[in-house]
Image (tube, rainbow, N blue to C red):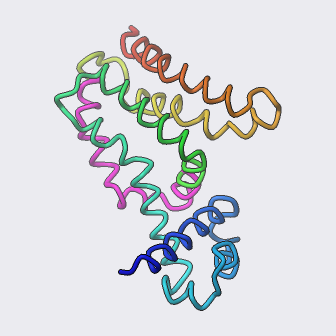
Amino acid sequence: MTENKLDTEEKIKAAAAKLFTQRGYAATKTRDIAEEAGINLSLLNYYFRSKEKLFNLIMGEKIRQFFGIVVPVITDASLDLELKIELFVEKYIETLTQNPDLPIFVLNEIRNDPKHFVEEIGANKILMSSSLMNQIRAKNPEVNPVHFIMNLMGMSVFPFLSKPVFMASQVVDENSFRALMEERRKLIPIWMKAIVESK
């Protein structure tokens, strides 16, 4: 594949991801994607044939990016629970700081089509059989591992979902938000340790 073709494909994918995130799948037209990418509609159709095919490609990439960063962590039996939590938080905050629209796009589409998400990354097998689940149960049988993982993901991801509200109300700016995320990188493992050790 030539460099020009790769550049054009990436340009189309970047434009489509931006519009799908802002408008959702239904409200995004292929003509809008072509215009955003600075190409004509026939060229877009040549590369990707249909909006659905383009969307599924981007969705798969985004899901793997969003969850793929932590799957190796939560499934690695050689890592203890404390280190797993630290790495989970570190990887999510680092990735979402660089890709702030990623959680909005992925979570919107998971809500619309949860079956596709489960099939894309095998979420049920990964979560239910992961060493993370077993370590939580071993650490404290009274703590439901599902609650624990929901809290861990919520603490790591929700600040990025709510960022536009805090920015619009001038509670934070870009620099102070980044500083808060650096604080959370250290605080979330402490909070999660308190949860798993609670009686």
Does the magenta stretch mainly form a helix, a strand or a loop?
helix
Residue 51 rendering spot, x and y as whole percentages:
56, 79
Residue 88 rendering spot, x and y as whole percentages:
38, 32
Residue at 69% across / 59% down in the picture? 22
Task: Tell me if 77 is positioned left or right of 146 in this view.
Answer: left
Residue 163 rendering spot, x and y as whole percentages:
68, 37
Q: Which quadrant: the C terminus?
A: top left
152 is higher (above) or lower (below) than 192:
below
Residue 42 rendering spot, x and y as whole percentages:
60, 91
| Magenta part of the chain | 107-136
Would residue 113 be counted in the magenta stretch? Answer: yes
Asked whether 175 or 22 is in front, the reply is: 175
Q: Residue furthest left?
A: 78
Q: Residue furthest right?
A: 169
Residue 147 is drawn in which quadrant? Answer: top left
Residue at 61% across / 33% down in the picture? 159
Task: Tell me if 161 is positioned left or right of 150 in this view.
Answer: right
Would residue 70 be counted in the magenta stretch? Answer: no
Task: Tell me if 129 is positioned left or right of 185 in this view.
Answer: left
Asked whether 156 or 179 is in front, the reply is: 179
Q: Which quadrant: the N terminus?
A: bottom left
Residue at 29% across / 18% down in the picture? 141
Residue at 63% across / 74% down in the picture? 37
